[in-house]
Image: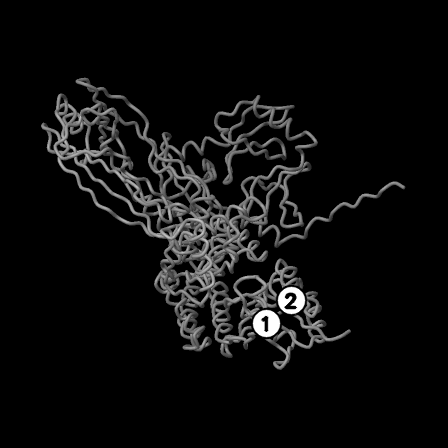
Amino acid sequence: MSPINLVIVESPGKVKTIQKYLGKDYLVKASIGHIRDLEEHKLGVDVEHGFTPEYVVPAQKKKVVAELKKLSEQACTVWLASDEDREGEAISWHLRETLGLPQDKTRRIVFHEITKNAILHAIGSPREIDMNLVNAQQARRVLDRLVGFELSPILWRKIQPKLSAGRVQSVALRLIVDREKEIIAFKPEPYYRVEALFRPEGMDIKVKGLLDTRFGSEQEVSSFLQDSIGATYHIQSVEKKEGTRSPAAPFTTSTLQQEAARKLHFPVATTMRVAQALYERGLITYMRTDSTNLSSLALNTAKQFILEHFGEAYSHPRQYRTKSKGAQEAHEAIRPTYLENTAIEGTTQEKKLYDLIWKRTIASQMSESRVLNTAMKVASDKRKECYGIQSVELLFDGFMKVYLEGHDDQEPDQEEVMLPDLRKGSLMQEEGISAQCKFTAPPPRYSEATLVKKLEELGIGRPSTYAATVDTLTRGRGYAVKGDKEGQSFLVTHFSLKGKEIKSAQKKESVGAEKGKLLPQEIGLIVTDYLVQNFTNILDYDFTANVESDFDQVAEGKKGWSETIASFYEPFHTHVKQVLSDHSYSKVSREIGTAPDGEKVVAVFGKFGPYVQKGEGEKRQSASLGKGQLIETLTLEEALKLLELPRTVGQVDGTDVVALRGRFGPYIKFGDKNLKLPKGADPLTITLEACEALIREAGSPEKASRQTLAEFGDIKVINGRYGPYIKQGASNYKIPAGTDAASLTQADCQAIIAASEPTKKFKGTRKK
């Protein structure tokens, strides 16, 4: 076989496209990410000798390594073409070291887009592996392993087995927990928001004005409405001001994640998966970047497109400066590789994300929009308060012709309306006044996108880590869940004035309801509180950002990586030993109140999660907290409701049907079967007839083996045809007899998996 040019990329998705561009003289193969890493089940770092990493090739990568080694020995030149970030640089270095590649036939090449020009340019301008970037990646990997390896066992001993801590994940969790504590401490205050409908004299249009004063009581608002009967209104002032709006910068990783969440409702992980597919197809530039820079080619192409399709007035070429704290590597922003391609073929998600990226890129090179802002004040002859009316007139759309950036948790107080040309002193006819009771709102919980935005603002983590951090918190560890939160309901009185008649009506007002937000679970609060109390610096936002800055200095060759680790590790390790010397268990409990029978009611976090307990000894009664319930906010009424369970509903075929509420929702127990209740069903009120229907349905062949009771990442608790079991990946595990499957926590499942062997799969014989 004649010598070949072997090109090694990270992802199999790139192979076909790059092979097409390079032709038959090159062979393109994929390493499929990292080919070696720190050993999984031990520290894997030689602390005594400069924190030297102890790398191993995982079993699942041995075949890939063997193939690449064989091909590299036959090659005349090996081109290492992993991604251009620190992780990619480290992958190239690992390939060189593991495959034993001689320096004289090894070339490192990088490209930030998969186009023919970019690939051929990379081949024409190879470089050496940048060991500063490699060392920055090694420093991150080693430090994260040291922190996780030393902190996690403390959590196992002090709180619960199988927990984990991480340098970035624990700080991200703290953000979620701190916000939840703000919300718990927040006391909603009522206020009255007063609006009036006006008709300019002699005109057949109506506009809404918002009073510049909020009233705090029914008495105040009633007095105001009484005074407003028969009032005369006029325009007290008119202010007109021309303004401009500028387009947003081209996408970075975090801004793409945020905008895809706002406009496309994509989870962070989905955005990165779809962007990866677009990149590998050669449709967009590299999707892990914190740069807003565009190449001169992209700037010129965008200018030409805008001139041809919109005209000279819409063209405004500009280069943006990266503002994110600790931005690294001279990458380019995320943009289409060919701006003339306004649409692509692909999945619905790919088309939507590409369209978003294309519009953002083009808009960034377009002119500012011009608007005329008009602010009016409408005054009464009977009260000093004024109504405000805001008007916005678009004079020139500019970039808004293509794209307008979204916003998070934005609830404007005033509507933007188009107004006729009204002058100071003009009379306004009042057409009705409404005074609605509202409540001050707590700060919003984080969504995936707003958490990423906050991490970036604080300089915590980097583009390549955001999605993984969110996924670890929500799926991997169960410290937080993505879900909806019901608001607190209040009975309020609304008032209205029509003519001379004041009316009132009672309605329910909800405060604090949210959808699709990150909700900390009890274990997340407990772990965070413990770490903040005992490892303050690790959970400090500035400290974590400063560590990232240290990594940046390693990447720039200004700091040695092992010295950077040493300065952190020595005091950290000493403190870990001090904490471990204290053998006390970190128990969390809170007295809720006293039950009607005089027994004390407490909420406790125990070995199998949070529960509520009434009484002691033989009279002791307990029940698990429901999904979304926290020890910190549980009320006595909620606790007593929980203690009404388990409830015997009746009998079906001579067997008791018992309704319960497990940590992961309500279910019924029928013999040795646990059946999850449908959404909205209440175990306290469900009828025997409804339970029987559920039991009969579960007994049918098509329903007998597919009911999921709980899910933790790749671990599921399934109620199968022959009883409940645990499924992890392709393996199934028996649940010990007498265990309540519906109440199993993630830690329980992991303990069962660790202590048992997978069940053997039955292989039937086929008749010949």
Looking at the image, which is closer to me, 82 or 503?
Answer: 82
| Residue at image mark 1 | 123
User: Hey, what amino acid is under mark 1?
Assistant: Ile
Residue 140: x, y in percent?
A: 47, 68
Looking at the image, which is closer to me, 27 or 607?
Answer: 27
Q: Quadrant of the C terminus?
A: top right
Label 2, label 1: how far apart the Cα atoms are: 9 Å
Q: Is 638 displayed left or right of 343 in the figure? A: left
Looking at the image, which is closer to me, 404 or 144?
Answer: 404
Q: Quadrant of the N terminus?
A: bottom right
Q: Furthest-bottom residue in view? A: 104
Q: Is 568 displayed left or right of 707 in the figure? A: left
Q: Could you say which quadrant of the image residue 183 lies in? A: top left
Callouts 2 and 1 close, C-beta under 8 Å: yes
Q: Is residue 378 above or below residue 269?
A: above
Residue 673: x, y in percent?
A: 62, 34
Sort mark 2 into few (<14), some (14-19) or many (20+) by Cα contacts within 10 Å.
some
| Residue at image mark 2 | 22
User: Hey, what amino acid is under mark 2?
Assistant: Leu
